[in-house]
């Protein structure tokens, strides 16, 4: 696979995995790391950017579409919405450090938008958590290969 195609595939997988759609960007990242022909730092940056931008898409959905949360097509179930809202109200902005976590991470980013969290701290906190998660994967693969 060419470099542009590999980076685009990783970016797309990371973006989609951060939204409410199913996906596993970790598998794509790991496969590209195991190939060994691309810089781990560039792969880390591409995956992180895609994943954070996917969370920004969730924030935008929460910000502008949360009035439709009672509709069938709304991407977060009422149960997950209420669960994430309770978590966010209890722990505040700092809960965004866990936006990478399975099950609650994606709804948490939607709730942050619905509750009008300012975008700058949102991006910083979500970015810290997601970069740390991908750095852990990159480090784990590097250790496994040595």
Image: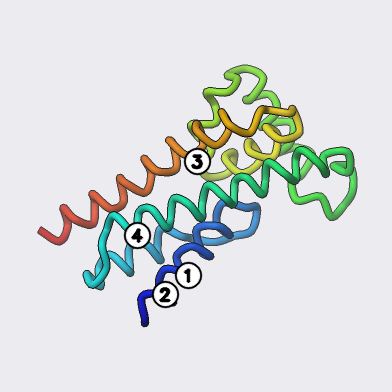
Task: State how far apart marks 1 and 2 are (Cα).
Answer: 6 Å
**Image x and y of residue 136, in percent:** 30, 45
- When the figure is inspected, residue 132 is found, relative to residue 35, above or below; the finding is above
- When the figure is inspected, residue 94 is found, relative to residue 113, above or below; the finding is above
The residue under the point 75% across, 37% down is 79
Q: Nearer the viewer, mark 2 or mark 3?
A: 2
CB-based contact (under 8 Å), mark 1 and mark 2: yes
Residue 4 tag number:
2
Q: Of label 4 and label 3, which has the lower sequence position?
A: 4
**Picture quadrant of residue 133:** top left
Q: Secondary structure at mark 1?
A: helix
Q: Secondary structure at mark 4?
A: helix
Task: State how far apart marks 2 and 4 are (Cα).
Answer: 11 Å
Left/right placement of residue 31 relative to residue 75 reads left
Q: In the depicted view, which residue is nearer to us: 119 or 59? A: 119
| Quadrant containing the C terminus in the rendered view | bottom left
**Image x and y of residue 36, in percent:** 22, 69
Q: Residues within 10 Å of mark 3 (few under 14, many from 20)?
A: some
The residue tagged 1 is 8
Q: In the depicted view, which residue is nearer to us: 9 or 28? A: 9
The residue under the point 82% across, 39% down is 66
| Quadrant containing the N terminus in the rendered view | bottom left
């Amino acid at each position: 696979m060419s470099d542009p195609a590999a980076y685009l595939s990783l970016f797309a997988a990371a973006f989609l995995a951060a939204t409410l759609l199913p996906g596993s960007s970790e598998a794509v990242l790991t496969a590209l790391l195991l190939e060994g022909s691309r810089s781990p730092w560039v792969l880390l940056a591409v995956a992180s950017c895609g994943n954070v931008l996917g969370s920004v898409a969730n924030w935008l959905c929460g910000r502008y579409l949360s009035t439709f949360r009672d509709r069938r097509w709304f991407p977060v179930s009422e149960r997950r919405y209420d669960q994430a809202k309770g978590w966010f109200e209890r722990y505040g902005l700092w809960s965004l450090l866990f936006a990478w976590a399975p099950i609650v991470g994606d709804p948490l980013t939607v709730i942050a938008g619905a509750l009008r969290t300012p975008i700058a701290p949102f991006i910083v906190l979500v970015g810290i958590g997601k970069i740390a998660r991908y750095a852990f994967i990159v480090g784990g693969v590097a250790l496994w290969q040595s």
